[in-house]
Image: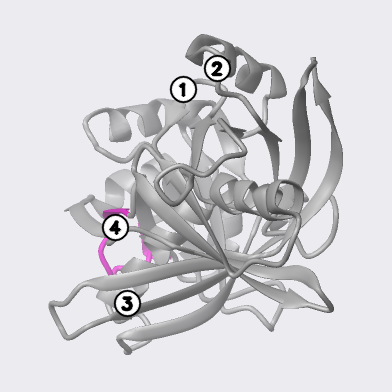
Amino acid sequence: MGYPLYLVDVFAETKYAGNQLAVIRNAADLAVAEMQKIAREMNYSETAFILSDQAQNGGYDVRIFSPGEELPFAGHPTLGTAYVIQQAVLAKKTPVVKLNLPVGQIAVSFSYRSGEADILWMKQLEPRFGRSFNVEEVAAVLNIAPELIDQNYPLQEVSTGLPFIIVPLKSLAAVRACLIDSAGYLNLVGNAEAKSILVFAPETYDPANQLNARMFDHYHGIAEDPATGSANGCLAAYLVKHRYYAAAKIDIRVEQGCEIGRPSLLLLKAEQEGEKGAVSVSVGGRVILVARGELV
């Protein structure tokens, strides 16, 4: 008997958009090395393994692997796995599914439309704000002129379980112009906690959206990710912390993946309690089932 296997598109408004994810159920007897081999064979940005259909400590034990390593947390696998649990394990409407991840327990809440799961939201861990980076050095890594970077805001590491370098750009043209210099990139992240870079600008292809973003992760073998929930959670925290919208609260739409033909939509909510208070972050989006089968 094999393992139930599901392919889903996460942060997708239509099938074959968003970020693909493979989810495998009842995987408790798979060794870590076997999970890593499967993730490498899938060759998606991540593959998620639900260890058991039985909840433990109020949630479902889940492990997430990129093709190269196990991750303590990742955004689109968290939403995609919660969707599979709601659809295939519980097989009923439920308001919340909790995942037990190495980073901690993450709650995913559901809204429904015509009885079907609609928007999924994940509440992320309290963000941590790290070091800032030199504008000229980052511009060289991105192969753009320094003046295309919005220097009213820092170029900063932020983490809600997985760290990213957040880089504010001035225009959509600047976002589109980014072309990673691999040697400079590896040198930049070599001594940094964050190994991935998210760039964004307040100009979009779709006027219904507020920001356009791209995420580069050459360190883990991902040239560009079509939709990154963890990175956008860090972005949401960054926007509030630095008052990008001159407000301590945001509720916005971010498009990602447009430049690589996988247009994605991520919904971001964040709020800070007072000038120095904690920032709460939620990332939402839709999940679409693409295929189901069996891993043998």
- Res 226 seen here: no
- Which kind of residue does numbered mark 4 sit on? Leu
Residue at 51% across / 51% down in the picture?
75
| Image position, residue 159 (x, y; %) | 31, 52
Q: Is residue 92 above or below residue 230?
A: below
Of the two numbered discs 1 and 3 on the same chain, state the one appearing first in sequence.
1
Of the two numbered discs 2 and 4 on the same chain, state the one appearing first in sequence.
2
Measure the C-alpha gap from mark 1 to mark 3: 31 Å
Of the two numbered discs 1 and 2 on the same chain, state the one appearing first in sequence.
2
Read off the residue under disc 3.
Answer: 240
Measure the C-alpha gap from mark 2 to mark 4: 33 Å
Q: Mark 3 or 4, which is nearer the eye?
A: 3
Read off the residue under disc 4.
Answer: 155
Q: Looking at the figure, which quarter contains the C terminus?
A: top right
Residue at 22% across / 56% down in the picture?
128
| Image position, residue 9 (x, y; %) | 75, 49
Marking on residue 69: 1
Q: Are marks 1 and 2 in contact (CB under 8 Å)?
A: yes
Write the start and end of the magenta stretch as one range.
146-159
Q: How many marks?
A: 4
- Which kind of residue does numbered mark 3 sit on? Val
Q: Mark 4 or 1, which is nearer the eye?
A: 1
Measure the C-alpha gap from mark 4 to mark 1: 26 Å
Read off the residue under disc 2.
Answer: 36
Measure the C-alpha gap from mark 2 to mark 3: 36 Å
